[in-house]
Image: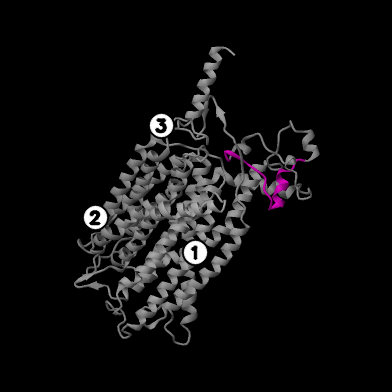
Amino acid sequence: MTSLELSKEDNLKGEEEECTNDGTVDFYGMPANRANTGKWLAAITLLLNQGLATLAFFGVGVNLVLFLTRVLHQNNAEAANNVSIWTGTVYIFSLFGAFLSDSYWGRFKSCAIFQVIYVTGLVLLSLATQLYLLKPKGCGDRKTLCGEHSNMEISLFYISVYMIALGYGGYQPNIATFGADQFDERDPREKPSKVAFFSYFYLSLNLGSLFSNTVLDYFEDDGMWALGFWASAASSFAGLVFFLGGSAKYRHFRCSGNPITRFSQVIVAASKRWRIEPSEKEDVFYEGNDESSKAAGRKMLHTDGFKFLDRAALITSKELDNEKQNRNPWRLCSISQVEEVKCILRLLPIWLCTILYSVVFTQMASIFVEQGDAMKTTIGNFRIPPASMSAFDILSVASLVFLYRQVIDPLVKKFKMIKGEAQGITQLQRMGIGLVIAVMAMLSAAIVECYRLKYAKEDCPHCEGSSSLSIFWQVPQYSLIGASEVFMYVGQLEFFNEQAPDGLKSFGSALCMTSISLGNYVSSLIVSVVMKISTTDNMSGWIPGNLNKGHLDRFYFLLAGLTILDLVAYIACAKWYKGIKHGEMIVEIKEDKYEV
């Protein structure tokens, strides 16, 4: 071999070492340089973006129910229903955003487009509030109601808030996955950072909402709605500037195409070949050598289970003889394509078990606040807004994220290494711990309610401090919810991102958001059923307008019992679950450039 050839070979090896191993590319579509792209510099930019966007979102959402009652003259039931629908819609839009990201746009483009929609919605809401909705001037506080509004003004309000829902919902799952993309999981030096990113992502989300739940909450509650909404708009715009400013440093994965088509092909092919008996020999499965096999980035190895679907990838003797002819993707699919469908089917039972946890989580923004409002909320002449108690949830999340990363996880890893196990607390184990802590939170809330009733004034329907028990007795239940979030939601983000196929990573993050959405709907259903059953025979029910005449403690005990049943089902699903199995990396190169 000549010296020139040796020099070329050394240069190629040097380039390979400088580039990432996971197939990511830079802004210009070239292989991502390890030193100049991604890692914590890019990830911190995205964390700042997430914190500012969350601040803006909760700046609108935290007091939206008060805005509807004070400014738009809706009654409590109508306002609560509209807020529930709006909140649920936000997270439903996350599936839409994930679909566009995984299929066509890619995560960077999706995040940018949805953030522009988000900022536009916030600016429109701020303008509509300042120019049209706050009339007469100074209305919207605790004392002064606003005047009547035209249909055009109300329509403008709803257009703006649902633009916010679309923008934030479509952006949220993509920013989480895009942040994880900045670390090469095939590099042992970067892989631990990828796992840690989700903890800090959830922390930034909570720190962003802390400012909204304290400072903006105070101004909006005092009637300064336009100021609060303009602050949210400014925060979202600053987040967008941060996001675009880091464009040159980001790493990107290419889109995988429409997953609905790939899934449909597997189902149709398996149905057409139902007479063919599946085989245990992997060499009879079609490995694929075209676009369908490259959709997910890495080949997926065959796994047991869902054997009916294996028929879609079985190669018959006739197909072996005609191997060179064009393949019909609706009659024969690659084994990676089949495993992609299997993977999603395996994730669904785990995901379904997280919905009831979200029911518990949503109580913090509704029933917990009503309970706190019926307690002693004053210290001297200062009144503590019951909704501000969620600050203890955020502080619990912040402290436990650091405690888990720096103390708990390293100690468990050392203990397991003594037993010959390399891994610390697994993601599935963490989610199970989150469910256990959620049970403890509901029991704590129930016990507090028992004592609140003990010191309650039954003849005081809605007066301030209708129980002499201090609102600070709620601190344990808020703190336990925060601790459960670190184990459940952070573990959930890590789990779905790791176990989702390469072409559906944003969809994995969207599943977390969707469980919160369905948790809101299931919570409303449970409350409706409980009230219908408990209000028979002229009884006031468990959750009446005057909590002193109800039994909110029984509702909490009911949720604790349901969560225990959910935990049992979750353990069964976790034991049944089989993790994803990857083969070698598939990277498509065209004209010396990688496609994003």
Local SS, label 2: helix
The residue pinned by badge 2 equals 227
Dot 2, crowdedness within 10 Å: few (<14), some or many (≥20)?
A: some
Near-viewer residue (270 or 1): 1
Residue 460 coordinates in the image, percent (x, y): 30, 83
**480 and 413: which one is in front?**
413
- The number of numbered badges drawn on the structure is 3
Q: Position of residue 132 (x, y in %)?
A: 26, 57
As for residue 316 lying within the magenta part, the answer is no
- Residue kind at label 1, given as amino acid type: Leu
Q: CA distance from mark 2 to mark 3?
A: 40 Å
Q: In the rendered structure, which disc, 2 or 3, sits on the residue that comes first in sequence?
A: 3
Work out how far the residue at label 3 is from the one at label 1, CA to CA, in angstroms: 41 Å
- Vertical comparison of 147 with 450: above or below: above
- Disc 3, SS: loop
Q: Which residues are magenta?
A: 296-315
* Residue 89, image x, y percentages: 45, 57
Q: In the figure, 58 relative to 558: above or below? A: above
Mark in front: 1 vs 2: 1
Find disc 3 in the rendering and name its residue.
36
